Image (spheres, coloured by chain):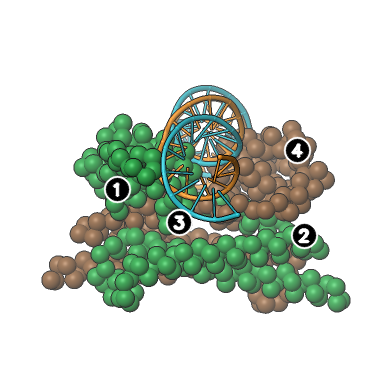
Chain colours: A green, B brown, C cyan, D orange
Amino acid sequence: MSLRHALLAALAQGEASGYELAKRFDVGVANFWSATPQQLYRDLERLEQDGLISARVVEQSKRPNKRVFTVTPAGQEELRAFGRRPAKPPAMRDEFLVKLQAVDPDDPAAMIAAATERLAWSRGKLAGYDKLRERMLAGRDEDEYLRAGEQIGPYLTLMAGRLYEQMNIRWATTVLETLTNRRTNRSAG
Amino acid sequence: MSLRHALLAALAQGEASGYELAKRFDVGVANFWSATPQQLYRDLERLEQDGLISARVVEQSKRPNKRVFTVTPAGQEELRAFGRRPAKPPAMRDEFLVKLQAVDPDDPAAMIAAATERLAWSRGKLAGYDKLRERMLAGRDEDEYLRAGEQIGPYLTLMAGRLYEQMNIRWATTVLETLTNRRTNRSAG
DNA sequence: CGCACCTATTCAATTAGTTGAGTATAGGGG
DNA sequence: CCCCTATACTCAACTAATTGAATAGGTGCG
């Protein structure tokens, strides 16, 4: 159970409300830890009960009030302790790969559609990451940032996300070509 | 819930027992769908109850008897239907990235250890995939297999796994270099 | 000859995650 | 003025996943 820790890590980058975290989890963090809003609210409450984060109500006139969360010293200690424990191997859940595994080579139409969709999805993700990256780099180049940039953790995880989507784009293109070539060969042969 | 479908897809590659599937899910399929043995046994029972797979007891003299599962025609139809439905976006759970996100640049020792561990893990995974690939290619080259190989679905998913681990190896190396360089600079400055 | 490990599975208990709806306020467009 | 969208949550019901252990015969090793 380390959604708790993913939340602590996200809040370590600056205080946020549940709603804001829900959005962060849909863009940046979503790349390596996915969660629904309901999960976030539930775990935020638990983290507060455990004294790892503290909440503060921010009154807003133009929209509903919100509860903004901050990591407490106890939470920071928990994050450090978490960092020292051995990490579980990464786990993936990718429906598209399950589908592709069982593709019928004689009827690849649905799979070609799915691969096209995946390609578009990855391009969208990458575009989002690229924007974030521009903001972080603020004119510097990557080598320079890696040497002395201030948010090295977030930059390296963003880098992982970018590499992952770049890989996906190249791979999905190969999948698409392979499936269409085979279809052509079949109908021609 | 598509462990059901991951199981159907795995069984579509040939009949297997729960125990054998548990091992497959620890090597090949684990790359895009992870599950514990308990999950497999539970879902195999459900799939059997739903008539999507059928079981056959294989008596063994030198070891405990086992139940070997095969996809039924109804199961094959379900797999095809699944292939036509839109896929959910991929979800990842990577503790290492959570840790790295919150790394303290002044105390990167634990993270350097974790990155080293990850690097070793990815190299191990890749070596396993490479062996599987050699067996599938059986002397042919990749282009040839993509054009006419018999198990195109499994090859393309294996390819995804290999690309993923190759990416991880390169990225983890950068992470390692970045963290150690920064440490050196700090202690030297 | 005894102990650890491998095959093959099952049981029980708990925690995590998903789905779908419901509540309330505010701003903008037609 | 009404509807749609966005903010900011909450509740309830359910399904999936994890953890830890139990069972039971067979093999290999010193």
SS for dot 2: loop
SS for dot 3: loop
What type is the residue that disc 1 sits on? Glu
Which of pointers 4 and 3 indicates the residue nearer the eye?
A: 3
Residue A105's place in the image compared with C18, above or below, is below
Chain designation of label 1: A
Task: Specify whether residue A4 is in view.
Answer: no
N-terminal-most mark, 3 or 2 = 3
Q: CA distance from mark 4 to mark 3?
A: 44 Å
Q: Please name the residue shown 55% across and 48% down the image.
A: B34
Chain designation of label 3: A
Question: Can marks 4 and 3 be said to lie on one chain?
Answer: no
Q: Which mark is residue B55?
A: 4
Task: Specify whether residue B105 is in view.
Answer: yes
What type is the residue that disc 3 sits on? Val
Q: Please name the residue shown 66% across and 68% down the image.
A: A175
Residue C19's place in the image compared with A183, above or below, is above
Q: CA distance from mark 1 to mark 4?
A: 54 Å
Chain designation of label 4: B
SS for dot 4: strand
Locate the C terminus of chain A by quadrant: bottom right
**Disc 2: which residue:** A104
Question: Can marks 1 and 2 be said to lie on one chain?
Answer: yes
**Disc 1: which residue:** A15
Image coords of residue A40 (percent x, y): 42, 41
Question: Can marks 2 and 4 be said to lie on one chain?
Answer: no
**Disc 3: which residue:** A27
Q: CA distance from mark 1 to mark 2?
A: 49 Å
Q: CA distance from mark 3 to mark 1?
A: 17 Å
N-terminal-most mark, 1 or 2 = 1
